[in-house]
Every structure is written in C-alpha cells, then in structure tokens.
Image (cartoon, rainbow, N blue to C red):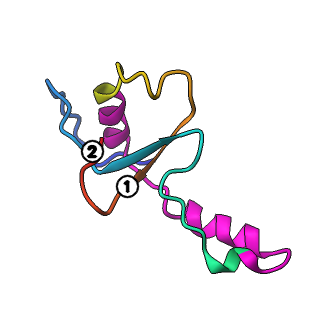
Amino acid sequence: MAPAGTQITVLDTPRGNSLAAEIDIPPLWRDLFIYRLPFIGPFLSLFGEFLRYNTTLEDNADFIAANLTNDRFVGHRVGVINDPKGKQE
C-alpha cells in the first residue's frame, strides 16, 4: 500500500471507493489457465494475482470507516482489491 498523495485531508464522511472486499478468501480471484501447468503453474498464477492487489492507504481507511458496523466483516480476515467496475460496498 502506498499513500495517494503527500497531503493529508480529514474528511467528515467516507468518500466512497472502488474496493471490492471478501471475507476469508481473496476477492475477485481469477482462475488463470497457467494454474494447470505442472509444478510451476500455481506459483506463476499466484504471482500474477498478487500484482493486482495494490490499493492506497486512503481507500483502505475509508473502507474500514464505512464498514465498522458491518457484521459481515467482524471476526474475519478481509481482503480488498481495486474493482475496475466502479464503486462497491
């Protein structure tokens, strides 16, 4: 994660973001054909997926603030990813 900019802006309400979230599994996981290659396929598939998981600190903080009372995420590992389709929960 990296900050979106050098300036810190305090918001009164969450601004919304394009993050997709899932509990206990990676969100928007793609099953690539390369996974089926013997021995090296799963590792190459993982590497390709990990490159997609880059978010900004501000988007994650906004997501946490907007979903503090969401019981779906309480007590679970939550994975987030930028969703190219637009704003999510």
Neighbourhood count class around disc 2 (C-alpha, 10 Å): few under 14, some 14–19, many 20 upward: few
Where is residue 29 shown, x and y percent of the image? 54, 60
Instruction: Inspect the image, locate mark 1, and give the three-letter code of the amino acid beneath it.
Output: Asn
The residue under the point 34% across, 19% down is: 69
Residue drawn at x 74%, y 68% is 43
Q: Tell me residue 13's x, y (percent).
A: 16, 27
Horizontal side, residue 40 vs residue 3: left or right: right
Q: Is residue 25 left or right of residue 74?
A: right
The residue that label 2 is drawn on is 6
Question: Which circle's residue, 1 or 2, is located before the other in the chain?
Answer: 2
At a point 30% along the width and 40% down the height, the residue shown is 89
As for residue 39 lying within the magenta part, the answer is yes
- Residue 8 x/y as whole percent: 23, 35
Front-lying residue, 10 or 15: 15
Residue annotated with mark 1? 82
In the picture, measured across the screen, residue 65 lies left or right of residue 77, that is left
Q: Provide the residue span drawn in magenta.
A: 36-64
Which is the main secondary structure of the residues drawn in magenta?
A: helix
Residue reaching furthest to the right: 39
